[in-house]
Image: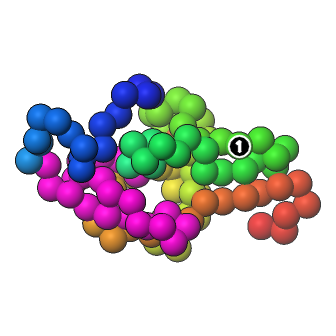
Amino acid sequence: MSPNIIRPDTDPVGRRDRPLTVTVDGTPIPGVHGQTLATVLLADGRSQWRTAPTGGQRGVFCGIGVCFDCVATVNGVPDVRLCRRQARDGDTVTTQTRLAGDAR
Ligand code: FES
């Protein structure tokens, strides 16, 4: 993913995109309709939102729905691939942790 993602509230060309807000671990962050949840998080400066069983931090790897590195809980549904899920206003994202020994 490009590190040059422009947040909608700071876009110098003034796009007319429809803004939305998603909540990530209780923090509201802005996005625009048409973005995936992964791009909303990336535009907010987040690159890691899951802890793998090994303790490694994960975020977007393939960006096309193949690797499952980007999963998180969305509106109470676990293991949603954020690179494939279009953001909707009011979505609630909860980061996931599956450290070794975790019962889930
Ligand atoms: S980044 Fe690979 S499935 Fe989402």
Q: SS for tag 1?
A: strand
Identify which residue is drawn at 84% across, 68% down.
Answer: 103
Q: Per the image, is 50 magenta?
A: no
Q: What x and y, as percent, mark residue 94?
A: 56, 65
Side of 41 where 103 appears, left or right: right
Tell me the quarter of the picture where residue 20 sits: bottom left
Magenta span of residues: 17-39
Q: What x and y, as percent, mark residue 75?
A: 46, 71
78 lies above or below 3:
below
Tell me the quarter of the picture where residue 28 sits: bottom left
Q: What x and y, as percent, mark residue 63?
A: 47, 33
Q: Nearer the viewer, residue 16 or 86?
A: 16
Query: Which quarter shows the N terminus?
Result: top left
Residue type pointed to by label 1:
Gln
Identify which residue is drawn at 45% across, 33% down.
Answer: 64
Q: Per the image, is 34 magenta?
A: yes
The number of callouts visible is: 1
Identify which residue is drawn at 20% across, 57% down.
Answer: 19
Side of 57 where 74 appears, left or right: left
Which residue lies under the disc numbered 1? 57
